[in-house]
Image: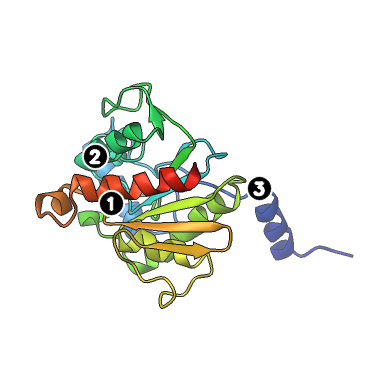
Amino acid sequence: MTTSRSEAARSSHQASPTLVPDRDCPLCPRLVAFRKANRAREPLWHNAPVPPFGDIKARLLIVGLAPGMQGANRTGRPFTGDYAGDLLYATLLEYGFAKGTYQARPDDGLKLVDCRIANAVHCVPPQNKPLPVEINTCRQFLVANLETMPKLRAIVALGRIAHDSVLKPLKLKASQAPFGHGAVHQAGAFRLYDSYHCSRYNTNTRVLTTDMFRSVFARIKADLD
């Protein structure tokens, strides 16, 4: 029996899911144009889809929004080089989900422990605001990461967009799992933990305090232990 091209492609995807878009991923025209402009302006920056950071065998996955212009888009490592990373990595170090010293560069030697970090959208969007169609298009890579983490038990969604992106692969309805800082939602063997995003804006406006952020990871640590 002859296998159709679509069946062959689907079989190939199931056997080896793509965890990160290609460097020149063409799927989102607006992000492609923005990427090209950034490469022309800053040729030494990463300026490409940012891959996940951390062991695929980790039990904890942290899902952010998208690479920051001066952070991951510049350095090539999630949350590295901007304020959000300062708070996130300090918290991960405090609760044993990282070891080493965070120095805001990808060669600082920092290692994640039983933890992995990915984004809902892999490319930096203009004004830090991905469009719904871009979020939906990029979700396939987040799904691939979820499906290939054999020991995954806990997922942290940093912000509403990350939360909403995780709901679909977990087969949760928004009405079943409304977003709220500190909320915990059960989805089979997984627990989804919500947090406001650790951006400078949220901390400057006191929407998120350091203690509020720490409390999320304190609970995760206690639950996993």
Give the residue at mark 2.
Answer: 87
- Marker count (numbered): 3
Residue 16, numbered label: 3
Q: Residue at x 24, y 39 (%)?
A: 87
Local packing at callout 2 (Cα closer than 10 Å; few below 14, some 14-19, many 20+) is: some
Q: Residue furthest left?
A: 205
CA gap, disc 2 to disc 1? 27 Å
Which of the 4 image quadrants contains residue 39?
Answer: top left
Location of residue 200 in the rendering, given as x and y in whole percent from the top left corner:
16, 47
Q: Residue at x 31, y 23 (%)?
A: 101
Residue 118, numbered label: none
Location of residue 168 in the rendering, given as x and y in whole percent from the top left corner:
49, 68
Location of residue 158 in the rendering, given as x and y in whole percent from the top left corner:
33, 54
Nearest to the eye among marks 3 and 2: give it. 2
Q: Is residue 194 above or below residue 69?
A: below
Among the two numbered marks 2 and 1 on one chain, the one whose residue lies closer to the N terminus:
1
Q: Amino acid at mark 1?
A: Phe
CA gap, disc 3 to disc 2? 34 Å
Position of the N terminus by quadrant: bottom right
Nearest the viewer among 70 and 43 is 70
Q: Residue furthest right?
A: 1
Q: Is residue 132 above or below residue 189?
A: below
Give the residue at mark 1.
Answer: 34
**Is any part of residue 161 visible from this angle?**
yes
Nearest the viewer among 222 and 50 is 222
User: Relative to residue 79, is residue 225 drawn left or right?
Assistant: right
Q: Amino acid at mark 3?
A: Ser
